[in-house]
Image: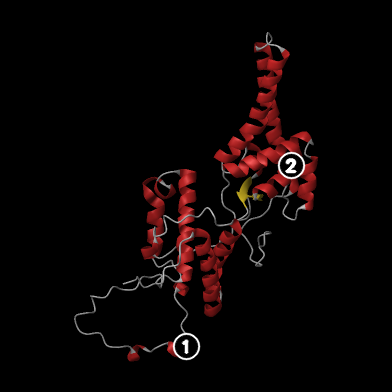
Amino acid sequence: MSDLVTGEAVALELRPAKLPSRALALVIDLVLAWAVYLGVTIGVVASTASLDDAAAAAIAVASFLLILVGIPIAVETLSHGRSLGKLACGLRVVRDDGGPIRFRHALVRGAMGVVEILMTFGVVACVASLVSARGRRLGDVFAGTLVVRERVPSGRAAFVPPPPPWLAGRFAGADLSGVPEELWLSIRQYLTRMGQLDPQVGWAMAERLAGELAARTGTPVPPEVPPAAFLAAVVHERQTRDAQRAFGGPNGFPGGTAASAAGSDHVSGAGPSSWSAPVHRSEQRSPAASPAVPQGEENARPAPPATGFVPPA
């Protein structure tokens, strides 16, 4: 079981890194950074011996900021949270909801690292990691990130069901920048476990989450779309945008393979049938009580999709 548990007592498939592994990764990164910094400094001093003291001091400060601050920020941004030390120790920096970090997360972590790592020789970072329940230093707290272990025993990952085919790309113009990470996390946890909930309880939770998401994005829930399907479609849209930023190309993969894979899940019936509105037992009908279909109209009506949704007329 994961060591990360949300406020709703739902376990995430992430394991926070412990202080020894984080310290080892930091030592590797600092050794490499200081080796590069000393080499560059020796070369700069040899080539600028004729400059005055002010110019030499400016070059030294610029070299310090570029090599010990700027390069680590760029490496974490381009590698999506894996520096050389973290790669060697099997660690990665992720957002609080498990998503990949962006430049602003790496910038905040790097800026705070100057104070709590470089200026205090890592004492502040160690104390903060020991105090935090999830081993986060101050840079992680301010950036909303977490260092997790990637090399963990393989297990069954939580499956976020895809939206029905007729909702794919419908919310491509939605503004997702105002949705907090806590709401994304609650939606993902609901979607992965809604099949285990009572239909009435699950429907009420979906309506509440869909209302909050619609208020944050400014995109109302269409009347013909069940709330759980709306949540799945918007989460799918966010995952598509993250994949495009991370890998480039349509849907994040060359040739749109991600879209075709998602489409194959819909065709094969991977979507949950519990997304439809809950039906009371008293409302269920036997096959004999269903109205007769006039001859010649059997093929005129489209068959319901395997996801349990009926496309709007």
What residue did someone put label 2 on? 23
Answer few, some or many: residues within 10 Å of disc 2's Cα (few below 14, many 20 plus, some between 14 and 19): some
Residue 175 in view in this figure: yes
| In-image side of 285 versus 96 (left or right) | left
Tell whether label 1 touches label 2 (CB within 8 Å): no
| Corner quadrant of residue 196 | bottom right
Q: Quadrant of the N terminus?
A: bottom right
| In-image side of 221 versus 118 (left or right) | left
Mark 2: amino acid: Ala
Q: Quadrant of the C terminus?
A: bottom left
Indicate the position of residue 27 as horizontal and vertical percent values: 72, 36
Q: Earlier in the sequence, mark 2 or mark 1?
A: 2
Q: How many marks?
A: 2
Which residue is drawn at the image coordinates 62% and 32% (left, top)?
Answer: 71
Which residue is drawn at the image coordinates 80% and 46% (left, top)?
Answer: 127
Mark 1: amino acid: Arg
Indicate the position of residue 139 as horizontal and vertical percent values: 69, 44
Task: Reply above or below: 40 against 121.
Answer: above
Indicate the position of residue 37 as horizontal and vertical percent values: 68, 25
What residue did someone put label 1 on? 281
- Colour scheme in the image? secondary structure
